[in-house]
Amino acid sequence: MGTESESFRVLSWNLFNENSDTQRLVNCVRATTPDVALVQEALPSHVSILTNCFGHVITARDYICRGELCHLTIASRFALRDIKTVEHFPVTKPPPSPLARWVGWIEFLDSLSATITISDACSVRFVVLHTSAAVGPSCRREEVLSVLEAHFEPTIPLVVAGDFNCFAKPWLTPFLAIPLAYRWGDVLMWEKKALNAHLGFRGFRPAVTGTTFPRWRLQMDQIFFKGLQLTDSHILREQFGSDHRPLVAEFATNASSASSRPS
């Protein structure tokens, strides 16, 4: 007799800490109807809305922009357990590059995870992160590695999502090397391909492909998964007031035919 699967939907979205109209967040949740939302750049007003929409919400520090702290958030219609916040840096972290000093960004403070019981037979570990923008790609790779090492759970399915800021390409190096304090290994980096390969080596697959940051026609956001069957995924065209587009992925918990093909 075959194993029955339970399905659930995940939203990952950098909703933009200057996107202060909370009705836009409500509209996004209504449009996507997720069971779990992994959110970056959430202000306290956003967290209140997420609590009303989902019931179960946890937060951690995301980054400080011009003195204002925004948050990473996991919001769920299911109860959250085994909650873990990893403090990667203090708020006194020195700006790592000339650009970071100029714009007043203190980035990559925390990462956040929790386990959710989807069905009697399956629990899933969810991790949300937001890597630094004002650094070279090798620094972001180190940040991703530190998150995986801190939150990795080898015995249950995993979803790792967020804004990975993977925008580095060789043709941009002449423009970015000095303001972002590039290392030698950053010069020829195709960062999105390198990130997919790096996580692929660890058994993760990307759920979506396409532009998530329309201003520069880049894909900087992703939902990576392991031990789950991907049944549907897409990037929304509407931004709901953010500079990033929302990502949605639907999964089944029966991993025997797990898909590695993003749609």
Image: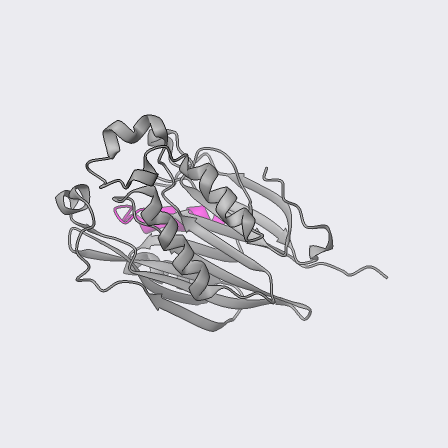
In the displayed structure image, the side of residue 255 where residue 92 appears, left or right: left
Q: Is residue 53 visible?
A: no
Image quadrant in which you'd find residue 42: bottom left
Q: Residue 53 at x, y = what percent?
A: 45, 60
What percent of the width, then of the height, locates residue 6? 68, 59
Residue at the left extreme of this rendering: 102
> Can residue 3 be spotted in the picture?
yes
What is the x, y in percent for residue 107?
Answer: 26, 53
x 51%, y 43%: residue = 197
Left or right of 82, for residue 183: left
Most extreme residue toward the bottom is 82
Question: Quarter of the image holding residue 129?
Answer: bottom left
Query: Was residue 23 drawn as part of the magenta stretch in this picture?
Result: yes
Q: State the scheme by which the image is colored.
A: one colour
256 left or right, relative to 132: right
Q: Depth check: 32 or 144 in front?
A: 144
Q: Quadrant of the C terminus?
A: top right
User: What residue do we see at 35% from left, 35% from top?
Assistant: 168
Image height of 38 relative to 173, above or below: below
Furthest-top residue in this view: 171
**Magenta part of the chain:** 15-31
Please provide percent x and percent y for residue 234.
54, 39
Of residues 163 and 79, which is closer to you in this image? 163
The quarter of the rendered structure image containing the N terminus is bottom right
Q: How many numbered discs, if any?
A: 0
Classify 95 as above or below 213.
below
Judge by depth and name the residue closer to the eye, 100 or 221. 100
Whether residue 160 is in magenta: the answer is: no
Q: Is residue 145 above or below residue 138?
A: below
Residue displayed at 57% across by 65% down? 154
